[in-house]
Image: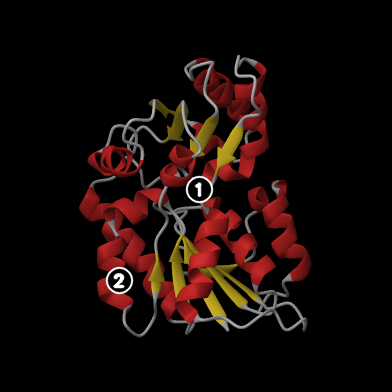
Amino acid sequence: MKIALIDSGIGLLPAAAAVRRLQPSADLVLSSDPDGMPWGPRTTADVSARAVAAAEAAAAHGPDALIVACNTASVHALADVRARLEPQVPVIGTVPAIKPAAAGGGPVAIWATPATTGSDYQRDLIGRFADGVDVTEVACPGLADAVQNADEAAIDRAVADAAERTPRDVRSVVLGCTHYELVGERIRQAVAVRGDSAEPLVLHASAGAVAAQLMRRIAAAEPDGGLAGGLTVLLSGREAELPEAALTYAEGRLLAAVSPVR
C-alpha cells in the first residue's frame, strides 16, 4: 500500500504519523511546496494550482490514496484535486474538528490562520455543527510560519498572543490548521494556564480522524506487523530528505526513525 499526503509544508506530519501508526507497512509519499508557501495569503486560484501541482507530483509515484493534509487546500482546492485524481486515486480532505468539539458542549475556541478565521467555509461548519454552542474564532497570525520554521521564540509569542485572546472559560480548542497540531501540547498548556474552567481543556485535532477516514475509504487491512513502509519526500516536486525543521517535532522523528527512505 502507498499513501500520499500534500500540504504547503510540514503540516502534513501529524496525518502522516497517524497513518504510519494505523498502517505501519504502508509506503508514504510526502509532497509539500516550500517554493510556494505559505498558501494562506494566496488567491483561491493560486492555492488550487499549487495544491494540484503537489498532488500530481505525488500521484506520479502511484499512490493508492491521497490525503490533502492542509485546511487551506481543503477549503480552496479539494474539488480540483479530486477532479484531477479521482476515481483512480481516492482523495481525502481535512476538516476542522468542529463537530466533535461542539458535541462536547461549549464554550469552544477555534484556532486557525487569519485566512481561515471568519471565512464562509468555517462559518458554515460552525452553523451546521455548532448551532447553539458558544464558539469563538481565534486568528493566529504567524503561528503556522513559526511552526514551519521551528522558530521556538516565534512559536511562544504566537501561542501566547492567541491564548490571551481566547476566552478563559473555553472547555475545548479546535486546531484549525494542521501545522498547529505539531505544537498542540504547548497550545493546551498556554490556554489552560490562564483558564478558569474547572474541567480539563480538550484539544480537537484532525490527523487521527483523517487517517481513520483514509482506512475506511480504501478498506485497509489490519497492520501486518511486517517491516515499516518506505518514505518518499517531495519538496516542490523534487525528491529530498525530510526538512531539518521536521525533525524538531515528535511526528517527524517518528517517520524518520521507522521509515526507510525509498
Q: Position of residue 191 (x, y in %)?
A: 60, 23
Quadrant in which the N terminus is drawn: bottom right
Q: Is residue 21 above or below residue 134?
A: below
The residue sitting at 37% across, 74% down in the picture is 56
Q: Amino acid at mark 2?
A: Arg
Percent position (x, y) of residue 27? 62, 78
Q: Is residue 235 visible?
A: no
In the rendered image, the vertical position of residue 168 relative to residue 94, given as above or below: above
| Relative depth, front residue between 107 and 218 | 107
Residue 247 spot, x, y in % from top left:
71, 52
Left or right: residue 119 versus residue 252 is left
Residue depicted at x 35% and y 67%: 53
- Pick whichever of labels 2 and 1 is earlier in the sequence: 2
Question: Circle 2 is placed at which residue position?
Answer: 82
Check disc 1: other Cα within 10 Å, few if <14, some if 14-19, many if 20+.
many
In the image, 38 versus 216, the foreground residue is: 216
Exactly how many numbered labels are in the figure? Answer: 2
In screen coordinates, is 169 left or right of 141?
right
Q: Amino acid at mark 1?
A: Thr
Q: Position of residue 37 (x, y in %)?
A: 42, 48
The secondary structure type at the circle numbered 2 is helix
Q: Residue 151 falls in which quadrant of the image?
A: top right
Task: Give the quarter of the image for residue 220.
Answer: bottom right
Residue identified by numbered label 1 = 178
User: Along the line of sight, which residue is nearer the eye, 217 or 72?
Assistant: 217
Residue 23 sits in quarter: bottom right
Q: Secondary structure at mark 1?
A: helix
